């Protein structure tokens, strides 16, 4: 497995995910500037968090038109695994690779804190080793993470088992208080219909080493370690 971490102007979590993949999981990983990316050289790609192009116009929209995204779309058609984290999720949405939209948080504040998310399906390459219903402690850091979709779109996501993660409370239940940004249906992450594209707002790379976590364990590693096993 050879993974590319795509760098856009304004990416700031690229080195974090690169460190986890290469130094913690020992996956062959390269940092690749978006203009130099060629998908034929890689088995998988990660769109990292940050503020690509300063979030001008709206988060992810300019990066969605980067030359790199043509190659990302070709990789996706080939069934190669693609992961978008936070700003990367926004880019996947804006490029049309995932459905719906990510709007300003309810309350409009930037939110940076640890949350609990529930794994809703083991039927993806990224969660195949995580029990359905498992609760993970993962941090978030975003201002535009409120997932919205048409009601029919939410219904289809549920019917197709494309909702991968939901925000939950300490008891593993969805509630208004456990939903940090007002996302519809408490959605924290979704996958493509083909299941090889994952977008999520929480940052698993920031919860992949016990030294970084106020909780026991490294729950983010449970998601990212899938790239070492595909």
Image: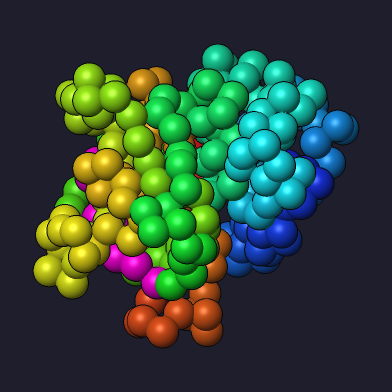
Residue 221 appears in the rendering: no
**Does residue 115 belong to the magenta stretch?**
yes
Count of residue discs: 0
Above or below: residue 170 compared with residue 230: below
User: Percent from the top left, x then y, of residue 78?
Assistant: 56, 16
* Picture residue at 52% right of the left edge, 58% below the top: 142
* Magenta-colored span: 114-122
Left or right of 15: which side holds 230? left
* Picture residue at 28% right of the left edge, 37% below the top: 163
Residue toward you, 137 or 42: 137
What is the magenta segment's predominant secondary structure?
A: strand
* Picture residue at 86% right of the left edge, 32% below the top: 35
Above or below: residue 54 compared with residue 203: above
**Does residue 135 belong to the magenta stretch?**
no
Residue toward you, 165 or 143: 143
**On-image quarter of the N terminus:** top right
């Amino acid at each position: 497995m050879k993974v590319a971490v795509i760098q856009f102007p304004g990416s700031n979590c690229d080195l974090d995910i690169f460190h986890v993949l290469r130094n913690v999981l020992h996956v062959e990983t390269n940092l690749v500037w978006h203009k130099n990316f060629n998908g034929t050289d890689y088995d998988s790609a990660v769109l990292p968090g940050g503020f690509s192009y300063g979030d001008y116009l709206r988060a992810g929209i300019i990066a969605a038109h980067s030359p790199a995204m043509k190659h990302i779309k070709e990789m996706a058609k080939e069934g190669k695994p693609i992961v978008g984290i936070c700003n990367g999720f926004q880019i996947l949405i804006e490029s049309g690779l995932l459905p719906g939209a990510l709007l300003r948080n309810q309350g409009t504040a930037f939110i940076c804190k640890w949350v609990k998310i529930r794994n809703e399906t083991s039927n993806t390459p990224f969660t195949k080793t995580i029990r359905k219903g498992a609760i993970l402690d993962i941090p978030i850091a975003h201002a535009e993470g409120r997932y919205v979709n048409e009601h029919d779109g939410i219904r289809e996501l549920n019917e197709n088992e494309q909702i991968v993660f939901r925000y939950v409370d300490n008891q593993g239940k969805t509630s208004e208080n456990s939903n940090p940004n007002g996302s519809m249906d408490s959605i924290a992450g979704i996958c493509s219909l083909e299941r090889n594209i994952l977008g999520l707002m929480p940052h698993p790379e920031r919860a992949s080493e016990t030294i970084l976590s106020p909780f026991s364990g490294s729950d983010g590693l449970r998601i990212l370690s899938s790239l070492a096993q595909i």
